[in-house]
Structures are given as C-alpha cells and as structure tokens.
C-alpha cells in the first residue's frame, strides 16, 4: 500500500524536475524543436490514423472499453473472473487518480505548435492518454497471458501491449505533448500495473477451476466428529458461500456445526457466550482481519484451535500464513493440514482498553488512511479503496514521539507512522517488516518518516528491493513446538534499532513496545480504526493462538526426519515470495 503514495510522490518529483532545473538542459531543452519537426511531417492519412488511436485512449473510450471488459469478465466465463475484473478496474482508476494528483502539482503548458486535438485543461505532464492506454490495454494483456490458453495468448497480449507506445507516438504527432510527457505517462501506467498486479494477482492459482476444485478425499483426523463453531461476517461470507463452506465441513465429517453471525457492534458475534455451552473441537472464522482479531481475543490461551477462512478486504494474516485466497480451498486445505502455535499482540493505551491483535497495530499515516477509507468503495474495490484515502494524507506532518523498547531508555524520534507488527508483509507481498514472523516470540516495529518526494522514493526502493530479493525463509519449527506444548521461542531478546533508506525507516524488535506521541494520533488495530490517542503499548503473547494451516509439501518429510507426527513437527511456513 505504501508504494502507491510513493508512486504519486515520485511522479510529482519527476514533473517538477522536468519543468524546473532540467528544462534548460539537453535533451529537454530540444523538445520544442522535436515537436515542430513532427508538424512538418503531417499528412492526411497519418492525421486520420493518429486520430483513431488518440480516440481509443480518450476518457470516454477508456471508460467504455473498461466497463465492457469488466462486465464480460464477470458474466461470460463459466466461472466469473472477479479478481481479474477488479484488477482491470483498479488499474484504470488508480492510474487516473495519480495522473490527476500529479497535474495539480505540476503545471506544464502544451507544446507551442498547431494541435490536432482540443487540449484538455490539465497539465501536459504526464500524458493522461498514454497512462490510461497502458493501464487499460496493458491490464488486458496481463489477463490474456494469465487466463487464455494456447500460443494465441501471446499474440493477443503483444498486440495489446503495443497500444500504449502507439498512443505515445500519436500524441507527439498531434502536437499534444512533449516527449518527456509521454515517457511520464508510460512510467505512471507501468508502475500502476505492477503495484496493483502484485496486490491482486500475485500468488493466485493459474486457473479458476484449480482455485475452486475440491482436494482429494479427507484424511482421517482426530478433529473429525466434534462440535464446530463457525463465525462468519454476513457481507464477507454471504449465504451462498456459507452453504459451500458447510458442504466442505460435512465432507470432512463435521455434522454438529453451530453458526454465529457477526455485527458492527459485536465483531465476533456471541462466540464468548457460546464457547462454554458448545465446548467446540474447532472454531472456523469466515471474515477479514477485523473479524479474526475479535475471535482471537476470545480464543487466545484457550487451546481451542482456529481455522481461518479469508473473506475480508485485506486478509493480511491469511496472506502471511500462506493460505489460499479462495475461501473453499483455504478451509479444505486447513482441515487436512497441520497445527501451529502463533503469537498474538496485546495492546492498550489512553482510551483503548486492553485487547489483542494478530497482524499489526499502528498510529499516524496508516491509521488515518484506514479511518478515512470509504466503506462503500472498500466493499466494491477491496484494498484498492485505501489508495484514495492514502493520497489525501500524503502531506500530513510527522509527529514527535518517544519509543521505549522492553522497558529501556526513551528514544526520541519524529515519524509519520508507527507500526507494530506480528507479521510483516502487506498486500502484494510488500515487506514492511522484513524480519517479522508470527512464531518468533517477538513483535517488530517500524518508524516511517520519509522527507519529501526523494524520501518516499528511497523508502519505496528499499521495500521493493526486499520484495524482489526475498527467497524462502528457513523454517524454524517454533510454531509447531508451541502448538504441541513445547514451550516458547528461546532467545526472544531485544534487537537494537537499525536505520534504513536514508533514515526514512527505522526498525526495532522486542517483546514489549511503548509509544508516546506529542499529540493525539489516529490509531488502528488489524485494519480497524480505533479511538485517537497519544499512547500505544503492545506486548507479545508467544504461541497463544493455535491454528490449522494447509500442509506444505515438505511437511511430511520434515516430520519423518524429526521422528514425530507431521502435525507436531511441521514448521510454520514463511510468507510466500514473489512469483518468478
């Protein structure tokens, strides 16, 4: 999520550079003569062809083609391609939003030549036509490669990818932009596709059929036959999906199933009241990170195992644990999977009663973004709805604060955002806390304070370098040991702070963190906004929550080498790395 504000800041900085200090230097100083040369080469046939391509990238055409393609993705295939439709719509919308943001900060007049189109009121930098063409037709090319079969998919994708360069040449020919403007449009469209694609398409199965196909028959398991409580969010897990999940439970031998609906007032429904009466063998949570947090607050320390079925907007814990994003596949795999003990964080502060979190607790920029995101857009666009909220807070000032690590001396800092994490990876595989693991027995902390566009760019580059360079982390086995009663992780001491990306990011890790801000800040827990305040204190509860996860391919071999049952010896898998 941090990459989109960084993209906007980078584009604004590039625009200021092109229109400022670099404007008098070659090759930018010669862009005017290049535009005049193209005017002299105009002809009737070229004018007609260029008009056609320019119209294909115009606002009305882009909106119309995008809507038709989205409707087609949702209605024409045997199984609707909802994620692909969301990817296409989000790519077009995000590119347009960043384009408009950049033009509000960069004012560049059009080339001083006869123009063949009516000039819109926006700045010449970057080219909106080129960026929109790349977001739309490049997005369709990505979908073609992923979903079409046979050699023709590459021909289709290649043709679609040529649209953006063609539009770039056309806009230069028609006198609407300088060369640096169309380069800016290409950069904006490319960055949008990469970021949105990583967030929505990364790690998904190669075909919808694979994502929804039931796995082979259930393996006999001691969990079978006891009472099960299913907590479901009514919007994230509607009745039709609940019926499918119920069929999976019955297929695994679970007949005594008690369903609980959540509400805005009670994020885990009546789970706390039902536990003593039902005495379940298993609790299945069908919702997002907020629903899971509320259920984990009840289940932590009880020893009652939990199965997570991702049905929310972000599903960050599910992503960090390597669960499939398809709810049916996640439930089916977990019911035949392995048992792990994961940590939870316990947090409190001024106006914030003690509660638990499983993903992250934060104050500042991220909390403001979460608080101000439109619920209507979240229900339609998923996590992409946070982008517009994030843009509004790009210029929010940092706050002075003190941080105490494991009761040590106060460290005085300034930051735009403080995040305390039990896991470290955001949507799209972005490693905000690269060393965080949910079975480490510690919490990781990052103070985020980029200075200007250069600071945002440096921080984004640092995070992307971790994303691209991350391999498979060696399993520790600590989570499984705790689930089997093997105690907590040894050596969970404090790690001294380290500064990265020119001081834009500073990391700590400890068992207890106390943050005090000089002024009240927005605060959030697992993606839910809570009351603003000046203090946030968190401590880890090692191995407090027992979860079942789909069995990794290497789990049986690891168990055999250790001479123990797979359920007890299988190590907790690392969060998946980027697709090669």
Image (cartoon, grey):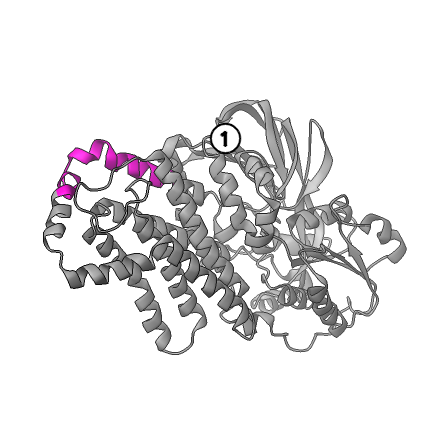
Residue 209 percent location from the top left of the image: 56, 74
Residue of label 1: 416
The answer to whether residue 546 is visible is: yes
Label 1 element class: loop
Q: Is residue 328 above or below residue 36?
A: below
Q: Residue 329: name its quadrant.
A: bottom right
Q: Is residue 361 left or right of residue 10?
A: right
Q: Is residue 51 left or right of residue 427?
A: left
Q: Is residue 562 left or right of residue 576?
A: right
Residue 350 percent location from the top left of the image: 69, 26
Q: What is the magenta segment's predominant secondary structure?
A: helix
- Are there few (<14), some (14-19), or many (20+) residues within 10 Å of tag 1? many
> What count of labels does the image hold?
1
Q: Residue at x 41, y 62 (%)?
A: 65
The residue lying toward the viewer, choosing from 389 and 33, is 33
Q: Residue at x 45, y 59 (%)?
A: 88
Q: Is residue 565 magenta?
A: no
Q: Which quadrant is home to the C terminus? A: bottom left
The residue lying toward the viewer, choosing from 461 and 31, is 31
Residue 288 percent location from the top left of the image: 65, 52
Q: Is residue 26 magenta?
A: yes
User: Start and end of the magenta stretch?
Assistant: 8-32
The answer to whether residue 166 is visible is: no
Residue 184 percent location from the top left of the image: 29, 46
The residue lying toward the viewer, choosing from 169 and 471, is 169
């Amino acid at each position: 999520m941090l990459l989109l504000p960084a993209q906007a800041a980078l584009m604004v900085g590039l625009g200021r550079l092109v229109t400022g200090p670099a404007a008098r230097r070659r090759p930018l100083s010669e862009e005017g003569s290049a535009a005049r040369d193209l005017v002299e080469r105009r002809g009737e046939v070229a004018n007609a062809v260029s008009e056609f391509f320019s119209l294909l990238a115009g606002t009305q055409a882009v909106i119309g083609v995008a809507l038709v393609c989205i409707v087609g993705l949702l209605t024409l295939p045997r199984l609707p391609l909802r994620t692909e439709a969301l990817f296409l719509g989000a790519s077009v919308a995000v590119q347009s939003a960043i384009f408009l943001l950049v033009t509000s900060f960069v004012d560049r007049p059009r080339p001083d030549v006869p123009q063949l189109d009516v000039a819109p009121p926006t700045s010449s930098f970057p080219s909106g036509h080129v960026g929109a063409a790349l977001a739309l037709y490049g997005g369709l090319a990505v979908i073609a490669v992923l979903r079409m079969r046979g050699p023709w998919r590459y021909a289709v994708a290649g043709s679609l990818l040529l649209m953006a360069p063609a539009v770039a040449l056309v806009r230069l020919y028609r006198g609407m932009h300088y060369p640096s403007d169309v380069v800016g449009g290409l950069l904006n469209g490319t960055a949008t596709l990469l970021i949105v694609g990583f967030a929505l398409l990364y790690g998904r199965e190669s075909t919808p059929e694979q994502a929804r196909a039931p796995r082979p028959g259930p393996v006999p398991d001691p969990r079978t036959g006891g009472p099960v409580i299913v907590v479901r969010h009514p919007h994230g897990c509607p009745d039709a999906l609940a019926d499918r999940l119920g069929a999976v439970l019955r297929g695994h031998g679970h007949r005594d199933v008690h369903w609980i609906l959540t509400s805005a007032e009670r994020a885990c429904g009546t789970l706390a009241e039902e536990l003593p009466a039902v005495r379940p063998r298993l609790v299945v949570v069908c919702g997002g990170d907020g629903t899971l947090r509320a259920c984990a607050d009840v289940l932590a320390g009880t020893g009652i195992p939990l199965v997570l079925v991702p049905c929310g907007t972000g599903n960050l814990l599910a992503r960090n644990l390597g669960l499939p994003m398809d709810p049916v596949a996640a439930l089916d795999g977990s019911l035949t999977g392995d048992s792990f003990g994961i940590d939870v964080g316990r947090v409190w502060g001024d106006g914030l009663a003690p509660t638990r979190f499983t993903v992250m607790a934060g104050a500042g920029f991220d909390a403001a973004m979460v608080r101000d995101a439109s619920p209507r857009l979240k229900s339609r666009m998923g996590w992409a709805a946070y982008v517009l909220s994030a843009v509004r807070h790009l210029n929010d000032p940092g706050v002075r604060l003190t941080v105490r690590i494991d009761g040590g001396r106060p460290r005085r800092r300034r930051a735009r955002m403080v995040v305390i994490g039990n896991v470290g990876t955001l949507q799209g595989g972005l490693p905000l806390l690269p060393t965080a693991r949910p079975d480490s027995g510690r919490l990781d902390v990052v103070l985020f304070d980029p200075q200007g566009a250069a600071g945002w760019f440096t921080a984004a580059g640092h995070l992307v370098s971790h994303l691209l360079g991350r391999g498979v982390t060696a399993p520790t086995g600590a989570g499984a040991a705790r689930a089997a009663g093997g105690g907590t992780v040894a050596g969970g001491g404090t790690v001294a702070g380290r500064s990265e990306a020119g001081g834009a990011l500073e990391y700590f890790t400890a068992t207890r963190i106390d943050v005090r801000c000089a002024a009240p800040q927005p605060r959030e827990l697992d993606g839910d906004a809570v009351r603003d305040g000046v203090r946030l204190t968190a401590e880890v509860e090692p191995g407090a929550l027992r979860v079942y996860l789909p069995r990794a391919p290497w789990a049986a071999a690891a168990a055999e080498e250790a001479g123990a049952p797979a359920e007890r010896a299988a190590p907790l898998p690392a969060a998946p790395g980027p697709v090669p």
